[in-house]
Amino acid sequence: MSRCFKGLDRSDRRREVGAGVRSARLLLTVLATSGALALAGCQVSVPVDGGTVITSASAHDSGLSALDDAGVVRIKDERRANFDMTGGSLRKSAVGLADGASAPSISTIGNGKIELNITAPHGTITALTDHISFFTTGDRPDITTVSYLLSTKDYEEYVALIRDGVQKYGLDSNAAENWIRSAADHTNAETGDAGFNIDGTSTGLRVNYEFRLRPGDTFQVILVTVSAL
């Protein structure tokens, strides 16, 4: 029988892992209170590299996903998103965005989950998620951080998601198991907005898991943030 999330103590601990992660944390707070997020502004395909135009169609033909208007619609319709971060980030020109453009967020909350695949220098980061965010600054030619949510109603599945991250992405096993034991004891587990962070780097990218347990919430989430080492 599955256990419910309840009776967990709160803690004030917070570890910052960069501007992209701070933005993702703010986004998660909005998500928890509203239950849904609107799609942020997207850009149409743009000329790059001496006039070569990257479009949703050409990106799709290559097996990769675009982040212009049409590309976001395709991701939501097909429930599949493929990105290449072997260089440590996503070039805006390669996903149909102008160099000065902002990056979108994609939400399918209540309408199924997206199969997300991020090609890393060593292997592939995979997930089933209903929310993906992309972080950049307007003057950068690339998207530096990809963030997504893992969610479940079930305690055992939540623990399985953590251990899956240990196996796939090199999260610190001892730290993960210590936190799991604390959560099971309902004593020292860190909860709420403070969270608890563990990095894994075995893929050649920094994969950060932030565990969040909010007593009383229907869904419990792990915020995963992918960025360069």
Image (cartoon, helix red, strand yellow):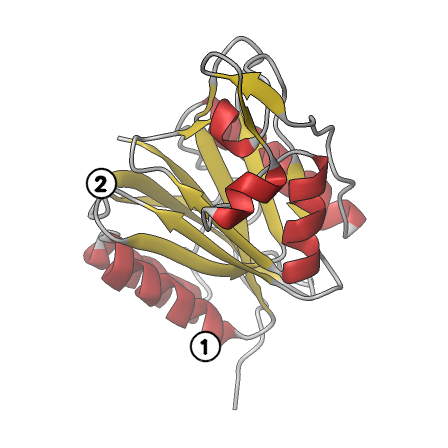
- Secondary structure category for the residue under label 2: loop
Q: Is residue 222 left or right of residue 87?
A: right
Judging by the rendered image, the residue that carries numbered circle 1 is 156
Looking at the image, which residue is at 60% across and 43% down? 57
Q: In this view, which residue lies farthest toward the front?
A: 51
Question: Dividing the picture into quarters, in which one does residue 99 lie?
Answer: top right
Specify the amino acid type for callout 1.
Answer: Glu
Looking at the image, residue 228 lies above or below residue 220: above
Residue 82 - label: none
In front: 94, or 39?
94
In front: 54, or 79?
54
Question: Dividing the picture into quarters, in which one does residue 25 lie?
Answer: top right
- Secondary structure category for the residue under label 1: helix
Q: Which is nearer the N-term, disc 2 or disc 1?
A: 1
Residue 172: image location, x then y, percent: 22, 52
Q: In this view, which residue lies farthest toward the top?
A: 139
How dense is the environment of label 1, judged by Cα within 10 Å: few (below 14), some, or many (20 and up)? few
Calculate the distance from the C-alpha at mark 2 to the C-alpha at mark 1.
29 Å
Looking at the image, residue 188 lies above or below residue 21: below
How dense is the environment of label 2, judged by Cα within 10 Å: few (below 14), some, or many (20 and up)? some
Can residue 223 be seen?
A: no
Looking at the image, which residue is at 24% across and 47% down? 203
In front: 63, or 41?
63
Residue 176: image location, x then y, percent: 29, 58
Looking at the image, which residue is at 45% across and 77% down? 156
Judging by the rendered image, the residue that carries numbered circle 2 is 204
Specify the amino acid type for callout 2.
Answer: Gly
Label 2 close to label 1 by CB (< 8 Å): no
Q: Is residue 92 left or right of residue 229?
A: right
Q: In the rendered image, which quarter contains the C terminus?
A: top left
